[in-house]
């Protein structure tokens, strides 16, 4: 999710990210961001510090209070570095100074997303871990070892195996 004013810079950034491997929402205010983080599973929030300035501190606090594991990356210019430092102290994942290399941004987004996934997995309630283990064991018992591995590794089952397709089609 990108947070900032609708400027040519943010529009360009949005189109670059959306044309890649990312699904990108664009919001212009802290309240919109908080509402979106509560209603959707957001991996990374990129905040243009030049647009939000001090509101970015409140935004970061509100994201943390929602219980979301979303990671925050701040984009700063020389005049907003002090706000970025405060955001880093409050738990922002990274700060990139404008202008930045696009590859640096993409790598930072990937790292932040991976960290979010790891934190979610670590904070998963014990009953959820047990439930997933039981589902994986059930799949393994019926010969769906690949599906069981995907469940254990925290991935959704991508497609039915040949064995499962045969059972569904009555070709056992």
Image (cartoon, helix red, strand yellow):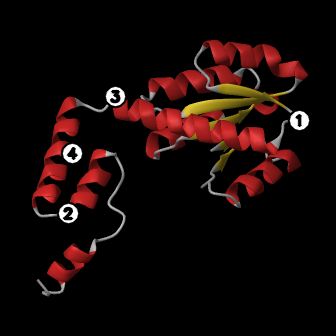
Q: Tell me if residue 172 comes above or below residue 44 in the rendering.
A: below
Front-most of residues 165 and 95: 165
Residue under label 1: 99
Q: Which mark is first along the chain, 1 or 2?
A: 1
As helix, strand or loop, the secondary structure at mark 3 comes to loop
Mark 2 touches mark 1? (CB < 8 Å): no
Can you say which quadrant of the picture contains the C terminus? bottom left
Determine the residue positioned at 22% across, 38% down. Answer: 128
Of the residues tagged 3 and 2, which is closer to the observer?
Answer: 2
- As drawn, the label of residue 123 is 3
Q: Are marks 4 and 3 in contact (CB under 8 Å)?
A: no
Tell which circle, 3 or 2, labels the residue nearer the N-terminal end.
Answer: 3
Residue 25 visible in this rendered orientation of the protein: yes
Q: Of the two numbered discs 2 and 4 on the same chain, state the one appearing first in sequence.
A: 4
Residue 56 is situated, as x and y percent measured from the top left of the image, at 68, 25
Give the left or right position of residue 129, taking residue 98 as reference.
left
**Residue at point 71%, 53% (across, down):** 17
> CA–CA distance between discs 2 and 4?
15 Å
Dot 1 lies on which element?
A: loop
**Mark carried by residue 137:** none
Near-viewer residue (111 or 36): 111
Residue underneath mark 4 = 132
Front tag of 2 and 4: 2
| 86 versus 166 height, above or below | above
Q: Closer to us: mark 4 or mark 3?
A: 4
Is there CB contact under 8 Å for labels 3 and 2?
no
Residue 144 image label: 2
Using a 10 Å C-alpha cutoff, classify the residue at mark 2 as few (fewer than 14 neighbours), some (14 to 19) or many (20 or more).
some
Question: What crowding class fits label 4: few (fewer than 14 Cα within 10 Å), some (14-19), or many (20 or more)?
Answer: some
Find out whether the residues at labels 3 and 1 contact each other: C-beta distance under 8 Å.
no
Nearer mark to the viewer, of 2 and 1: 2
């Amino acid at each position: 999710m990108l947070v900032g004013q609708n400027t040519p810079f943010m529009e360009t950034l949005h189109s670059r990210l959306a044309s890649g491997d990312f699904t990108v929402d664009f919001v212009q205010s802290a309240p919109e961001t908080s509402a979106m983080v509560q209603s959707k599973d957001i991996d990374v929030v990129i905040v243009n510090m030049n647009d939000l300035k001090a509101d970015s501190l409140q935004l970061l606090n509100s994201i943390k209070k929602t219980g979301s594991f979303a990671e925050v990356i701040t984009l700063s210019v020389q005049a907003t570095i002090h706000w970025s430092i405060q955001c880093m102290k409050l738990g922002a994942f990274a700060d990139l100074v404008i202008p930045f290399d696009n590859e640096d941004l993409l790598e930072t987004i990937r790292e932040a997303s991976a960290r979010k996934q790891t934190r979610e997995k670590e904070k998963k309630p014990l009953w959820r871990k047990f439930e997933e283990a039981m589902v994986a064991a059930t799949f393994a018992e019926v010969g769906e070892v690949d599906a069981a591995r995907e469940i254990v590794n925290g991935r959704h089952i991508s497609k039915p195996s040949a064995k499962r397709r045969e059972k569904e089609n009555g070709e056992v």
